[in-house]
Amino acid sequence: MTSLTWTRRRASVARFWRRYRRRRAGLYGLGALVLIALAALAAPLLVGGDVQSVTHAPGTALEPPSREFPLGTDQFGRSLSGLLLWGARVSLAVGLLAAALSVAIGTLIGVLAGHYGGWFATVAMRVTDWFLVMPSLVLAIVLATVMSRSMWTVILAIGITSWPTTARLVRAQTIAVESRPYIERAKALGGGHRHVMTRHVLPNVMPLVLSQTTLCISTAILTEATLAFLGLGDPTVVSWGGMLQDARETGAVSSGHWWYLAPPGIAIAVVALAFTLCGRAVESVLNPRLGAGR
Amino acid sequence: MVIMAPHRSLRLLLATGTVAASLLTTALAAGSPARAVAADGAAGADEGDGKTVLTVAVSQSVDSLSPFLAQRLVSTSLHRLTYEYLTNYDAKDARTIPGLATAWKPSPDKLTWTYTIRDDSTWSDGKPATAEDAAWTFTKMMTDENAATANGSFTANFEKVTAPDARTLVIKLKKPQATMTALDVPIVPKHVWEKVGDFSKFNNDKQFPIVGNGPFVITDYKVDQYVRLEPNKTFWRGAPAFDELVLRYYKDGDAAVAALRKGEVSFVPNLTPAQAASLKSAENIKVNDAPGRRFFALATNPGARSKDGKKFGSGHPALLDPAVRRALFHAVDRKTIVDKVFQGHAVEGEGYIPPRFGTYFWKPEGAQKIDYSPARAGQLLDKAGYRKNGSGKRVGKDGRPLDFRILCHATDPNDKAVGKYLQEWWGELGIGLKVDCLDNVSDPWLKGDYDLAFDGWSVNPDPDFVLSIHTCGALPATPKDTGATDNFICDKQYDELYAAQAVEYDPAARAGLVKRLQSRLYDTGYMNVMAYPNAVEAYRTDHIASITTMPAAGGNIYGQDGYWSWWSAKPAAEADGGGDSGSPARLWLVLGPAALVLLAAGVFAAVRRRTTADDRE
């Protein structure tokens, strides 16, 4: 049985990839992501862990780009190109973890509300609505201010504020799935709540959750950068938003040190764009009606 | 399949927009072509109606406009400008000169001081300023605890203050007091202030103009937006030359510098090294780099306690061991901090009082000095029983590792930068450090919930106040109260020396005592001064023709010990459209595309969203 399942799964992955391959924008996005992810993973090998050290900084303060420092140096004399690579690790990690957290909360609440219905759904959806109408950036700022400054705080702040959309989507999909006859059959055969939710509903909302996650990541990365730029991140961790904040505090903007400001800003834009492109491609592959024309 | 609501993509666009917009605004502020005539009525030195306005960029919030409560530099500077003190400090060499009092004389036993009050000082509502006002101000501070919040240290030793006639003020002391010619207490008009009920709640910011007798009168104030002052035409020393003085708030240093470049403000204090370097080459802008009044120190929690003997807070017990504190300071390379963090715009820290106040400056010599020596720090820790364990961390005999927290001001880039260095220096010793950067450090500080903290005070020509904050008397009465104490230090020997200098009238003998006091403070090891940051500030020469620095030779402008800078500032004859240097244009070339890319990302997402909208259920 297992070999049969695996064959089927392999076939469906291959089918997915064949369709995905046809979307050029999606491929560009994926290519950019793979490159950035590889660079981030290989950062310790490429530039070494010493690049974050202020006491062993090789350069002088705010040097313009040169052969030794392709993107110049920051106010401590550290190489900005090295910091940019290290920043990718934090920005990607925060983006992925926050998106995962947000989608996990959203899926859990969505499936439960869709499955049980009744007063539980009413209460859960009103809470969702409440979070939905709250300006999420303001809420995230409040959370990040109240809690201690660390990377986990930022992840939590983003995750807690961005789950309601997923919850609503997943609930709708759950209701659609549960109205199908085979769910009725499963129930008639003695399937409990747990069985229905995990064996029948979850696999059917997974594609939706997957594309939602991909799209959530770019939002999360941008929110992380915004929070760090506003000075709410962990000042001892190098991230792209944090680099922008450092540049502003150093006075790089008014002093014309563009090499401190532009690279992190462009990096944030590129990664957010790449995730969006991938998310769109996944979305249209998984939804034939959406992708027919493209 | 049900697809997500359009709402999400809007948020993506918004989030993209936020980063792009913040980049854009800063870029705009820095890059747009200069324009001397500002659109806003309050800006620029030259206005359409010929009014000359001096605009000063500030970032520190006013804590209170009541002279009985105000402690921050911006508020006390405002009080210098709006109220006369009995005496003032000379701009040239900070010696005591007449203020509201024209002459003063102690009795032979030095316990009764008689001040002659000038007859040409009037309040801005027309009533004359008399000895009665001064007597009422001091008496209020002696009798009402709430009125003693800010300057209570000056009147704690007063027995009785009387005004036998309008021109004579008599102060009787319990014991001699060295600060009698440096009473930094604003004298307020009795006829206005006697109507005030609760001094702990009254912030003096409801009725404008605020009645005063200084060179300026506060005419308007909006929290964290601006403070507007007009010259006091009847000021006895002569009215200031500018028609208006505005303190305008810029919470972002770079925005203030951009405003200076454009001519929207005339003066910006607290520049970063990068800003100072780039402004040096700008047209019509003069950068002033002067020895500062401040010290920048590391404070260790000596075990927070109150006067009733109760201990509170969560300071690390290992810091009660003098060897640990000494080891920590041995591992701080003050020269690197001056060179790298302040980039030369500071003087290496030594004693407590900055070298600018030469009479009282003291520095440790020889064996007393805790110099930079990580090896010595390691030996000290080994000897004290904090040995490295398998993973290279120092652990005490109780098994608790040396992991400290340091309180840092989230708004101060220097705190964060030095925090990074400390993490690495102490990390090599096997000591962990967590840098806790908060917007509001006061809460954990007052509760004693810190191990170390970045600390700093502006020092007056008379050092009594900055010395008084380390005495046992300054501790809070109970753990719930707020004391004047800086760092919960309470040392018997220090208190004895403090009491001795406070009653010493001979300047040389007092200076000697103050130096011994600093030596004792240094030896307790609760405070270690890392640097004396310079005052780095810039002003537009096409707005301000001349301005007095203090001291006159190479002194600072913002936060002086008197009102000299703004009182003496002369407007420039004609403010012509100040051209800008080329660097912001180059900045635009890069920042423009960066912002565009960000915007494009958002727009792209939105467009993609919309094109698929029809297909969605």
Image: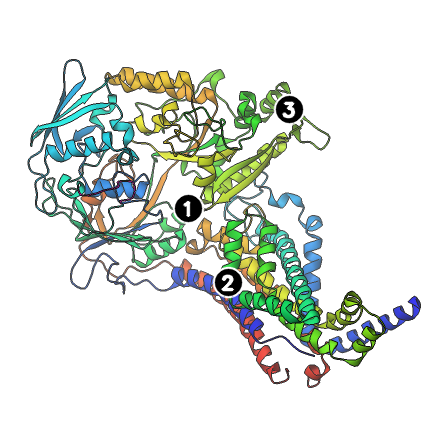
Q: Which mark is residue B386?
A: 3
- Can marks 1 and 3 be said to lie on one chain? yes
Q: Amino acid at mark 1?
A: Thr
Q: Nearer the viewer, mark 1 or mark 2?
A: 2
Badge 1 or badge 2: first in the primary sequence = 2
Q: Amino acid at mark 3?
A: Tyr
Badge 3 or badge 2: first in the primary sequence = 2
Front-most of residues B118 and B326: B118
Tag 3's secondary structure?
loop
Q: Is B48 on the left or on the right of B377, as rendered?
A: left
- Can marks 3 and 2 be said to lie on one chain? yes
Q: Nearer the viewer, mark 1 or mark 3?
A: 3
Residue at 22%, 45% (x, y): give it. Answer: B566
The image shows residue B311, relative to residue A251, as above or below, that is: above
Residue B244 percent across, percent down from the top left: 19, 53
Q: Which mark is residue B360?
A: none
Residue B614 percent across, percent down from the top left: 61, 85
Q: Is A35 on the left or on the right of B251, as rendered?
A: right
Q: Nearer the viewer, mark 3 or mark 2?
A: 3
Magenta range: B195-202
Please give the residue where the numbered disc 1 appears in the rendered image. B272
Q: Is A77 on the left or on the right of B522, as rendered?
A: right
Question: Magenta region's main secondary structure?
Answer: loop
Please give the residue where the numbered disc 2 appears in the rendered image. B19
Residue B234 percent across, percent down from the top left: 9, 45
Q: CA distance from mark 1 to mark 3?
A: 39 Å
Q: Is the N terminus of chain B in the top left, top right, bottom left or bottom right quadrant?
A: bottom right
Front-most of residues B12 and B190: B190
Q: Residues within 10 Å of mark 3 (few under 14, many from 20)?
A: many
Q: Is the C terminus of chain B in the top left, top right, bottom left or bottom right quadrant?
A: bottom right
